[in-house]
Every structure is written in structure tokens, then in C-alpha cells.
């Protein structure tokens, strides 16, 4: 099996459950921006170290973003085919983010002034991911149906990433259970 299909050579891309859009379409821009945010989260996760609390938290968010991208990559005529929590963002997913924000804020004192990103490499990556999520949110506003929970999810996610970055700066995440091998970049 080859990774390339050549179907996108005409400047279009396929949607989940069928249909095609121009690669410059607003919906494609929205889920492409989410993909970019997910890649920055992957960098933060890598920097945090396998087995750390932050690693576990971020991988859950990355999996949620697969659901969110599927939601965005489905045309209006096929939204009835979406599955809650698998290809459709749910209220429970948004509530889970709120619970994580509250839990982190309860254990990590939050700054009372503007935070200046860059105190630690991992926190800086979380802040970059946060800004990309904010851009994805702006893109999603114009393409999501009113009933969609994509925009609320992205809004809460950016709040969570800000909170996570501040907790990372404060050293409030548990480290990996197994130390990194000698000579590692952790």
C-alpha cells in the first residue's frame, strides 16, 4: 500500500464519509490548524518525557483532537453519520477539559499578572500549541454548525493549555516513573 493516492493533485481533499473540498476551503483550513496544534502538543509531550503526568495528559488531548478533526472534516450532508466521542465532539469532552482546568488550578497557583511564555521549553511549547488552538477556534467559528461543540471544545482547550503551561513552569507535574536513559535529552 502506498501513502500517496494522487487524488489531491487537483487541489481538492476528501472528507470523512464522502465528498471533496478545495484544499483552501475554510473547513480544511480549520482542521489543518487543529492538526498543527496537535503536532505542537506532540513536541510538548516528547519534551515532558514518556510516562510523565504531562505525557499522559497530552496524549489524551491528542486523541480528542482526532475526534475534533473528524467532526470538522465531515460535510453537512453527512453529519448524521458522526459517532459521539469517536468522530463527534461531545459535551462530556468539553466538561472533561473544564474538570482538568479546575483540578490544575486548585493545585497550582495561577499568576495574577500576564504570563510571559518561555520560562521552560515544555511550557513554551504548550503556549505555542495554545496559540495555534486559538487560531483553529477562529477558523472553526465560520464552518461549524450551531449545534457543534467544536468551538466550545477549542475554547476550553486553549484555557487548559494556558493552565498546563503555568503548572509546568511551577514544576507541578509529576515526572516520568522511569528515569530517562543516560545521555537522553529530557
Image: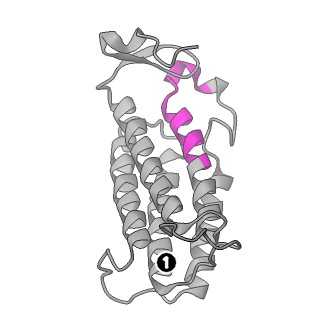
Q: Is residue 142 above or below residue 118?
A: above
Closer to us: 93 or 174: 174
Q: Residue furthest front?
A: 183
Magenta residues, dominant SS class = helix
Residue 90 location in percent, x, y? 64, 47
Q: Name the quadrant containing residue 123.
A: bottom left
Kindly identify the residue that appears in the image at 66 percent across and 24 percent down.
Answer: 81
Kindly identify the residue that appears in the image at 46 percent across and 16 percent down.
Answer: 4
Residue 107 location in percent, x, y? 60, 87
Tell me if residue 115 can be seen.
Answer: yes
Look at the image and name its color scheme.
one colour
Kindly identify the residue that appears in the image at 64 percent across and 54 percent down.
Answer: 93
Q: Which residues are magenta?
A: 63-79
Closer to us: 19 or 165: 165
Kindly identify the residue that appears in the image at 33 percent across and 31 percent down.
Answer: 26
Q: Quadrant of the N terminus?
A: top right
User: How many tags in the picture?
Assistant: 1
Q: Left of 164 or right of it: where is 83?
A: right
Which residue lies under the disc numbered 1? 168
Closer to us: 154 or 124: 124
Tell me if residue 156 can be seen.
Answer: no
Residue 163 location in percent, x, y? 48, 74
Regarding mark 1 in the picture, which secondary structure is present there? helix
**Residue 17 in magenta stretch:** no
**Residue 64 in magenta stretch:** yes
Closer to us: 73 or 182: 182
Amino acid at each position: 500500500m502506498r501513502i500517496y493516492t494522487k487524488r489531491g493533485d487537483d487541489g481538492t481533499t476528501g472528507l470523512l464519509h464522502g465528498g471533496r473540498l478545495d484544499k483552501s476551503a475554510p473547513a480544511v483550513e480549520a482542521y489543518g490548524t487543529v492538526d498543527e496544534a496537535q503536532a505542537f502538543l506532540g513536541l510538548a509531550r516528547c519534551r515532558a518525557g514518556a510516562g510523565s503526568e504531562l505525557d499522559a495528559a497530552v496524549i489524551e488531548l491528542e486523541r480528542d483532537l482526532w475526534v475534533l478533526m473528524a467532526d470538522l472534516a465531515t460535510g453537512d450532508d453527512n453529519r448524521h453519520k458522526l459517532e459521539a466521542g469517536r468522530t463527534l465532539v461531545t459535551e462530556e469532552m468539553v466538561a472533561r477539559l473544564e474538570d482538568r482546568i479546575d483540578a490544575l488550578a486548585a493545585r497550582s497557583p495561577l499568576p495574577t499578572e500576564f504570563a510571559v511564555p518561555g520560562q521552560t521549553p515544555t511550557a513554551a511549547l504548550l503556549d505555542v500549541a495554545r496559540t495555534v488552538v486559538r487560531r483553529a477556534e477562529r477558523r472553526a467559528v465560520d464552518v461549524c454548525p450551531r449545534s457543534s461543540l467544536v468551538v466550545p471544545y477549542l475554547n476550553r482547550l486553549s484555557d487548559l493549555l494556558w493552565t498546563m503551561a503555568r503548572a509546568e513552569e511551577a514544576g507541578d507535574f509529576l515526572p516520568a516513573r522511569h528515569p530517562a536513559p543516560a545521555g537522553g535529552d529530557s
